[in-house]
Structure formats: C-alpha cells, structure tokens
Image (spheres, rainbow, N blue to C red):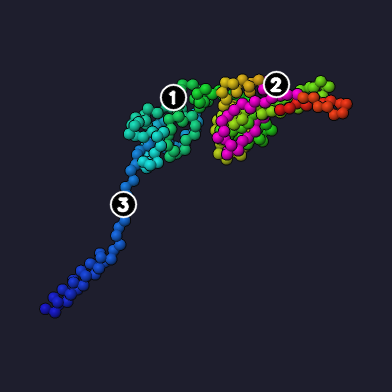
C-alpha cells in the first residue's frame, strides 16, 4: 500500500512540474511568411559577347517587395529558360544577378554590334599609354576626348593647341578586349573603341586626321552626365603691348 502511495505522489509531482514548465514557457513569436516570386537569374558569370547556353540561367525565389518590373518572372515568362537560349550577352552578368532583357541580344551581327545601343556607333582611335592615363583606362570607363595639334602661325613659329571635343564618352574596348580582366592593373593597347553617335563619330574622325587624340579618364562620380559635344569658339585676337602686337588664340 505504501508503494502505491509513493508512486501516486511521484506521478503527481511529475505532472505538476510539467504543468509549471508549460505555464512559464515564453510565447512563440508569430511566423511572418514572406511572399516570393521566382525571377530569372544568371547561374554562372556571363561575359559580354558570350552566348547563353544550357545551365547559364535558372529560376530563383525573390521577395515580392524587391522584384523590379524589369525582372523576368516565371509567371510572366515561363518559357524564358528555353526562349533566351542562344542570345548574346551585351553586358556582364554575375552569378545570382537578375537577368534584364536589355542585357541580352538576339542579333545575328557580331559581338560588338550586339553590345551597341540603338543609334550608337563604335569608332576606334589610335592610343598609347601616354594618351590613356598611363594605360589605366579600361572598357566601360567614361572619358573626355581631347585633341592636340601643332600649327604654324604667321611669323613662322609653331603653336600647340589643345581642346576638349567630347565629354563623358563610354569606352567599349581597348584593342579587342571588351571587358576589364580582374587582376590586371593596366591595359595598354594601340586602339580604343568609343561609343559615339553619328555626329560625334564624324567629329572624332576629322579630329584624328588633323591632330592627336587624348583620352582623359573621368571620375566614377561624374559618369552620370549626358555625353556631349563641347562647342569651342576658336577665336584669334590681336593683343597690343606698346608698339608690338601678338596674336593670341582664345578657346
């Protein structure tokens, strides 16, 4: 009988302890379910000019609030994995980056032509390390185009002139390299290919025929300006100093 009483007391004590533990357990936080949308991303790093192949793209869940209207979602483009296969990459994509349709091209033209926006021209100019910031100008950098030339004046002396022709111009390639190679501090080539419109292309062609072109590297913080032709008024004035006169060119 005593054993039964002891067993009953032990069971009661255990039940009381369990009840106390349940009563003092902190409330569990509410689970917030984040709504997600599957968007198309690059599954591997993709370089400009590369063709999209099998396994280069995949679907990935993305929070709804972070989905841009430019992203390709599975709900709107369910065939994207197959329909985008064979397209040319226009600008670099890193693994996990959402794919924007304007970064791809289905053009049958060459790599560089596929990378050019509508209305733009690719124009190559002669360069050296001295004319490209010591070789530190790389593809996708922004530059100002400066023309330097030497011309004779009336008294037979030579006059050195320099003027900025274009501002905030995108560099497409140095020689035939259209992207910066990681680990290379400088890229010295013999030609730089610039992204220009038709009027800018004519100006650069004429300037290269009559002088030397120098590329001035712009700060990354100045790259949002609109590319433009800088209008320069080449006016000569006569400056008189006593009985002598000197012709000065004003830019």
Residue 182 lies left or right of residue 236; in this view the side is: left
Quadrant location, the C terminus: top right
Find the distance from the CA under tag 2 to the CA under tag 1: 39 Å
Q: Residue 31 carries which label?
A: 3
Q: Is residue 210 magenta?
A: yes
- Residue designated by label 2: 210
> Considering the numbered disc 2 on the image, is that residue within a helix, a strand or a loop?
helix
> Considering the numbered disc 3 on the image, is that residue within a helix, a strand or a loop?
loop
- Of badges 1 and 3, nearer the viewer stands 3
Seen at 36% across and 41% down, the residue is: 64
Residue 108 lies, in percent from the top left, at 46, 21
Residue 159 lies, in percent from the top left, at 78, 26
Residue 91 in view, yes or no: yes
- Of the two numbered discs 2 and 1 on the same chain, state the one appearing first in sequence: 1
- Residue designated by label 1: 106
> Considering the numbered disc 1 on the image, is that residue within a helix, a strand or a loop?
loop
Seen at 59% across and 21% down, the residue is: 199
Q: Does the magenta stretch include residue 220?
A: yes
Seen at 47% across and 35% down, the residue is: 93
Residue 93 lies left or right of residue 235; in this view the side is: left
Residue 248 lies left or right of residue 9; in this view the side is: right
Q: Range of the magenta residues?
A: 207-236
- Of badges 2 and 1, nearer the viewer stands 2
Q: In the image, is residue 24 above or below residue 169?
A: below
Is 71 in front, or is 1?
Answer: 71
């Amino acid at each position: 009988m005593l054993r039964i009483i002891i067993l009953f007391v032990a069971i009661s004590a255990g039940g009381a302890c369990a009840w106390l533990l349940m009563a003092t357990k902190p409330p569990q936080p509410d689970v917030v379910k984040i709504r997600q949308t599957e968007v198309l991303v690059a599954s591997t790093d993709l370089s400009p000019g590369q063709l999209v192949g099998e396994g280069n793209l995949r679907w990935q869940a993305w929070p709804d609030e972070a989905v841009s209207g430019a992203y390709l979602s599975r709900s709107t483009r369910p065939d994207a994995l197959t329909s985008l296969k064979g397209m040319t990459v226009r600008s670099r994509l890193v693994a996990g980056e959402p794919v924007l349709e304007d970064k791809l091209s289905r053009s049958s033209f060459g790599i560089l032509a596929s990378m050019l926006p509508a209305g733009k021209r690719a124009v190559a100019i002669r360069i050296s390390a001295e004319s490209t910031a010591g070789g530190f100008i790389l593809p996708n950098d922004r530059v100002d185009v400066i023309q330097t030339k030497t011309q004779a004046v009336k008294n037979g002396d030579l006059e050195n002139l320099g003027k900025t022709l274009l501002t905030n111009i995108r560099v497409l390639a140095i020689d035939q390299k259209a992207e910066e190679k990681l680990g290379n501090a400088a890229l010295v080539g013999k030609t730089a290919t610039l992204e220009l419109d038709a009027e800018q292309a004519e100006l650069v062609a004429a300037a290269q025929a009559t002088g030397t072109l120098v590329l001035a590297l712009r700060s990354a913080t100045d790259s949002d300006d609109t590319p433009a032709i800088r209008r320069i008024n080449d006016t000569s004035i006569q400056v008189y100093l006593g009985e002598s006169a000197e012709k000065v060119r004003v830019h």
